[in-house]
Image (cartoon, rainbow, N blue to C red):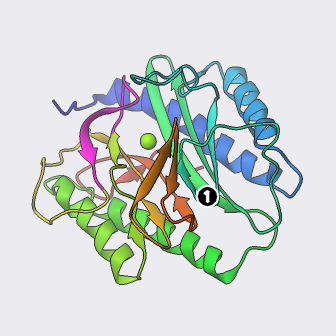
Amino acid sequence: MILIKNEREIAKMKESNHIVAVLLRDLKGLIKPGVSTQELDEFADDFIRSRGAKAAFKGYQIKGLPPFPSAICASVNSCIVHGIPGRAIILQEGDIIGIDVGVNKDGYYGDAAMTYGVGNISREASELLQITETALARGIAQAREGARIGDISHAIGNYVERKGYYVADSLTGHGIGRSLHEEPMVPNKGVPERGPRLHKGMTLAIEPMVNIGTNRVKESGWEFYVADGSLSAHFEHTILVTEKEPQILTKV
Ligand code: MG
């Protein structure tokens, strides 16, 4: 069932998503060569706690894996999503790093991701970031009262493929609210005018994950990698469907 949020719930979601947005902005300022992804995680953990919220990913459980150990996902270069931060993972000039943040404040979740360059990055890498961020914007633009999930999926997938890139297999966006992952799934590829219909008061996390070389993924525990080792980028916003323009809740 797709849940519609009332005014009070929307106000709560705005709070948790605002924490996510400010944190992602602040993390951007810390990203430079020589910094470990563990340091970014510690900063995030402290920040989330200082806002009276909980890190939503920490301790997250899925069957067959140990609980996710960290506050953020830090996915470097060919890591698509769910990268586990570590003291030995030191950012190098030219890397790209996707940071995904989830928080729970007063029972409501916020979720967003950005991919940042470390120092100077190649033209290839910066084009990938730009395409992925634009794909997200195009998907969000479809999220209006009366449209369907397939309209969002198609806007993302069609744009990415026309540009000669690939959306990562099997990874999708999702509804969000009192749970981190709610119905509906929001695939990054699809057919217009298909899938569940959107109504005002729905809250969705839309999140294209775009690869340079192939759509195929390789799993290693929690972490998803591009099968051919090429670069991957990830941008995500939580949005509120309204009668007019969608509202991005994870924008500062
Ligand atoms: Mg998400």
Task: Decide if residue 163 is in sight here.
Answer: yes
Q: Is residue 73 left or right of residue 248?
A: right
Residue 226's spot in the image, x, y percent? Answer: 50, 59
Residue 152's spot in the image, x, y percent? Answer: 26, 60
Magenta region includes residue 185: yes
Q: Nearer the viewer, residue 8 or 63?
A: 63
Crowd around label 1: few <14 · some 14–19 · many ≥20 (10 Å): many
What residue lies at 40% left-to-right and 70% top-to-bottom? 166
Residue 156's spot in the image, x, y percent? Answer: 33, 67
Which quadrant of the frame does ligand 1 lie within?
A: top left
The residue singled out by tag 1 in the image is 115
Residue 188's spot in the image, x, y percent? Answer: 32, 59
Number of residue marks: 1
Helix, strand or loop under label 1? strand
Q: Amino acid at mark 1?
A: Thr
Q: Which residues are magenta?
A: 175-187
Magenta region includes residue 164: no
